[in-house]
Amino acid sequence: MAPRYGSTRERLSVCLFIGALGVNFRICRSGYVALGPCVDSGRPDGPGQYWIWQCGEAEEQCSAEKVVVAAPGITFQSLHGRQAAGHVDELQDVHREVYGEADQEALFAGRLRVWRRQQGFVLAEARHGDYLVGFATGMPLRPSTSWWKDLTAPLPAEVTTEHPGRTFALTELLVRAPWRRQGIAGSLHDLILDGRPEERATLAVLPGAIAAQKAFRKRGWTRVARARGPQDGSLVLDVLVIALPARHR
């Protein structure tokens, strides 16, 4: 039996049983999810350390709050600012594979440098072993954000005015092509938004990305605007918003 440290709440984990699959697994709300036999990594010692639970035949009783189902062997973890710095090359590899455009690669590299330095930046990763198969990034919007400045039609101030704690921006959600349609994107989406204290979240997606548009709307996202960057040739993007559960605040 794995050693116990503190209460279930202190361990920040949720144990679930998926009857149809015959799989027990634990969602570690500090950021790590896995399938397999039950193993506890021990007490976290500082930044970058996680409670790591891999549950197969768990004997503990845990309350079920959330279900995340993805392909067997996929693990998920959540990282912040400095922790993400050592993963930049891998993130760029995934971005390059998904988009395959040199100009987009350079643009992403520049944005990622800025994002990582912003307070509240979060990186959610999905890995098969050590191999990064997908990721999501996001951060809270600041009152001075430019997020709402390039809209093709104006929105009321009550929609675009930001204050601390109002909006979390989901800035990237990418999965390598061979790993799609396995629940990985949905799990990354849920991991990065779960427990957010903000009132709402927002993202931008290509109007022609039909599969992504359908997936987001199925999860409750609503299109509120369309935006185009200030540079010549900038892409037109749909801006989506979703209200976050009040119980998180």
Image (tube, rainbow, N blue to C red):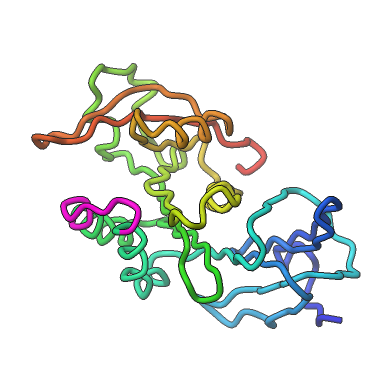
Number of marks in picture: 0
- Tell me residue 26's x, y (percent): 74, 63
- The answer to which quarter of the image holds residue 168 is top left
Say above or below: 70 vs 234: below
Relative side of 15 to 210, left or right = right
Overall secondary structure of the magenta section: helix
- The answer to which quarter of the image holds residue 226 is top left
Q: What's the residue at 41%, 42% (across, down)?
A: 164
Query: Most extreme residue toward the front, as rendered?
Result: 178
Stretch in magenta: 97-106
Q: What's the residue at 50%, 76% (across, down)?
A: 130
- Residue 14 within the magenta-colored segment of the rendering: no
Observer-nearest of 96 and 198 = 96
- Quarter in which the N terminus is drawn: bottom right
Say above or below: 222 vs 123: above
Relative side of 185 to 17, left or right = left
Relative side of 186 to 146, left or right = right
Observer-nearest of 46 and 228 = 228
Q: What's the residue at 50%, 30% (across, down)?
A: 214
Residue 193 seen by the camera: no
Residue 209 seen by the camera: yes
- Tell me residue 124's x, y (percent): 49, 59
Say above or below: 235 vs 136: above
- Quarter in which the C terminus is drawn: top right
Say above or below: 61 vs 148: below
Relative side of 51 to 80, left or right = right
- Tell me residue 208's x, y (percent): 35, 30
